[in-house]
Amino acid sequence: MKALQDYYAMLGVSPEATPEDIKVAYRRAARRFHPDTNANPGAVAQFRDIAEAYEVLNNPSARAEYNLAIRQRGLPPPYFDIRVTPSKRALRRLPEPQVLYLLVEIIPNERYAEQDQRQVPLNLALVIDRSTSMKGPRLERVKQAAHRIIENLNPDDILSVISFSDRAEVVVPATTIDEPATLKAVVSTMQANGGTEIFQGLQAGVKQLEQSLNPKSVNHLILLTDGHTYGDEEKCLRLAEEISQQGIGISTVGIGQEWNDVFLDKLASKTGGSSTYINAPSAIVRFLNERVRSLGAAYVERLRLSVAPDSDVVLEDAFRLVPHPQPLPTDKEYIPLGSLEKNKSISVILQIQMPALPENRFRTVARIDITGDILQDGYRGYKVVSDFSIEVSDEAPQENPPTAILNALGKLTLYRMQEKAMEALSTGDVREATRRLENLATRLLENGQESLARAALAEARRVARTAMLSDEGQKALKYGTRALLLELPPPSTK
Amino acid sequence: MFCEECGHPIFGEGAAEATRQLQNAPDELGMKATWGTARLGNNTSIIIHIRDAEEPIILQLNRELILGRLDPTSDTKPDLDLTPFGALEKGISRMHATLQRNEDTLTIIDMGSINGTYLNGQRLTPQQPRILHDGDEIRLGKLVLHIYFQ
């Protein structure tokens, strides 16, 4: 069932608003987000919502009908909330652009999140790389992990297992978990052999998921690989984008050092999933089971964030801090965020560029909304909107940013320093890369991250000598600095 | 706020001299999160600091308090009249927002005001209560006030 939208909230008017109030509110909003004046990708979605709300509320008979529907069905309860905290409460009046950070928290409302055992069925596809390099402990651990997943799934969950090398093979076609022992035996027969063509595996996995696609389920594909895929990356990304529309998420797990982290990051972020690096095969079992557990704890799925800055404001960057630290794409109407668990907030940090601010006044910055499907009640497209404004003043106080933002940015900076070193190296600037890695090592040490600092220093020396990073060091730094974000204290105190 | 070149924090006191080695890690600089507790004890007073006003308003709230602008021609009147603080030119409605005391929290509700009520920059949806935290900034039209619990 499509959730009944709160059109009054979308327009920012009271249910008692007069037709004139509604017109004024619509004009004000339309001026901000009309595609002719606002080129930000997120503005398209906001304008569509505003127009939809206006169409109903501006028409007396449609409005009466809508009011009746609200009375009879009721608006959905507040399943979750958004809180936006800016890095500054007021901006200095400046003749040049300045940066503003917004911490966006999506906070589950415990009262409406299912409290007892999970009710939501999983529709899960495990897509496993069985190329020659997986031979030995890697594939054995993956099989073990699959066994454990089968044991932990509920009987009405649906699982499929696909193995792939240069072609895909459906090891377990989509099935409920009626005979776990048989399933486990089948999984055990997997043999390592051949190359790595991820698209083959993805496509076969999606086919299995599609057979039982259900808006009331968590539909998810977990891809495990230890290798580079050649020539089919674009095809994979296109497929990820398509299935994201259908409500399928992808989580990726890279094992060892040889896989393409940039590609797997992109693949996962297209659907709001997570991408992870596992160094030791022994960690595979624990990680996969944790991932499946958290998928099962979701009460909101297909969560997506839309950020519509005002026409003169630019969204420069978005990064999910918790629960799965990940750079987020900002070039689309919606930023997929995956699922919301009942006791875990999601935090995203947005880097926003404000234009030159020539006059003292209060001004709007961006409208932010979060949309998701509420699994337990079968509501699709439940939406919470937040409109953020800020004061521009000569007397903007010199206050320090809130701790939560500072901590997050401090850790994010370490990650970015690592990225910049990689960038420098990829353009062949060895000296620059060395310098950046040395700086990173110093900072890491100051943050008490000794082993990461040592890794950074070792890589700095290696780069200076050989103009190359070790695959191992590169992944350790990238995912190590990213993992620091997980150690942040929870931003909101109750 | 952190230099992406070298990772130095660049904010607050040391901002202008970023090359100096800062002894303190950023989280030791004595910063306070913008929001404090949302818990409102039984004997807690509510302190409202109105910007540019000399004295804060201190009150013991039992149930609710309507903030607005007194208009002699209208039948309704607010519990707290903001006229002395420039309510008219700052765009405050006659019945602008309500502060409401609940079991152990304080909420604010926008009453469908023309120029809106903002909580830490977020515009409130009319008639939907939001929980206030100690130190929150509220804006009614163009009038800024801070709420503290004591």
Image (tube, rainbow, N blue to C red):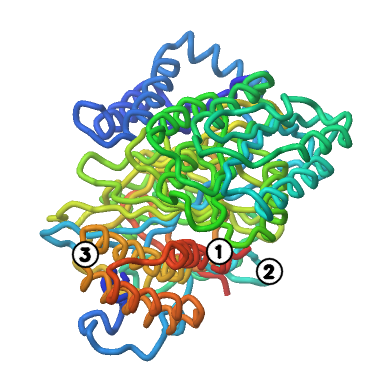
Q: Amino acid at mark 1?
A: Leu
Disc 1: which chain? A
The kind of secondary structure element at disc 2 is loop
* Residue at the disc numbered 3: A92
The chain that hosts pointer 3 is: A
Q: Residues within 10 Å of mark 2 (few under 14, many from 20)?
A: few
Identify the residue shown where x is 49% and y is 42%: A268
Disc 2 target residue:
B41
Q: Which residue is mark 1?
A: A486
- Whether residue A290 sits left or right of residue A275 in the image: it is right
Q: Tell me what residue is drawn at x 42 percent, y 33 percent.
A: A237
B19 in relation to B91, above or below: below
Q: Percent from the top left, x then y, of residue A295?
A: 67, 42
| Up/down of A212 relative to B45, above or below | above
Mark 1 → mark 2, Cα distance in angstroms: 33 Å
Provide the chain ID for the residue under circle 2.
B
Q: Secondary structure at mark 3?
A: strand
Q: Position of residue A382 (x, y in %)?
A: 57, 31
